[in-house]
Amino acid sequence: MLHVRLTLICSLLAVGHSAAVTDEAERTFSSGVQRVGLVELFTSEGCSSCPPADRWFSGLKADPGLWKDYVPVAFHVDYWDYIGWEDRFARTEYGDRHRRHALGGGARTVYTPGVFLQGQDWQEWRADRSPRRDEFEAGELRLTVKGNRVAIHFDDRQPGPGGLEVNLAILGMNLETSVRAGENNGRMLRHDFVALHVVSAPLEPGPSGVSATTTLPRTDADFDELAVVAWVSRTGSQTPVQSVGGYL
């Protein structure tokens, strides 16, 4: 997990600008009962092999399965920063998540670009494929956003041992970087579904499922287009149980 803990029903006090939600209109995102896969791209602006994967990931915006069959998140890692270019979107905790996925998800080693579906190494992206619909009934994950307030509710259809926690992320879209050093020196790189900030909170049991209430994660700058995603996992595990997301 990305261990940035939240206090339920309280505001997240973080440095930076709030994710831009300019009206109080309520938006509700629902996964439905069938499992929505979490597709994770581990990438770096300092990696010369990554631009093709970034282009594939951006192409998912036009895929009819987006948000219905799967939720994409691009995690920029910082372990290539030392070779000449510091990726402005990279975080150490994203690299840590990649390493844990590689250990438990079938990857031979930690490398970029790395794509994981439901925590498992997934190579089908190289054939320009998108994830297929999962028929497994995980339960409905519902995300309600009003202004900067967020309510999360999960109806767990396959309860297991231990507790559940929700991970909430703000994603940046249509992002461009002119790289001036390192392996991609001289290239203009374009990114979508970039994890700008991720927080996590425990889900508390109630009469009809588990839930949490919090605020949107904060970003370090203003962005023109954002998306919000959430995924539930069992305490102590990175494997997603259910995911949901959509454009803000």
Image: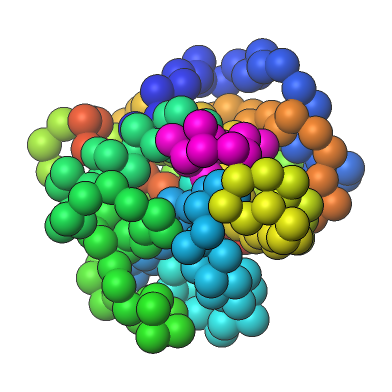
Please identify the quarter of the rendering in which residue 93 is found: top left
Asked if residue 136 lies left or right of residue 42, the reply is: left
From this viewpoint, which residue is outermost toward the left?
161
From this viewpoint, which residue is outermost toward the right?
22
Residue 95 in view of the camera: yes
Q: Which of the pair 2/231 is nearer the observer?
A: 2
**For the N terminus, which image quadrant?**
top left
Whether 84 is among the magenta residues is yes
Asked if residue 42 lies left or right of residue 13, the reply is: left
Q: Is residue 243 above or below residue 87?
A: below
Residue displayed at 11% across by 36% down: 161
Secondary structure mostly seen in magenta is loop
Residue 216 in view of the camera: no
Colour logic: rainbow
Residue displayed at 21% across by 50% down: 109
Whether 135 is among the magenta residues is no
Tell me where the magenta segment starts and ends, as one range: 76-90
Residue displayed at 33% across by 52% down: 111
Residue 240 percent location from the top left of the image: 31, 50
Q: How many marks?
A: 0
Q: Which of the pair 12/223 is nearer the observer?
A: 223
Q: Is residue 195 above or below residue 53?
A: above
Residue 178 percent location from the top left of the image: 78, 52
Residue displayed at 81% across by 45% down: 223
Residue 97 percent location from the top left of the image: 34, 38
Residue 130 percent location from the top left of the image: 43, 80
**For the C terminus, which image quadrant?**
bottom right
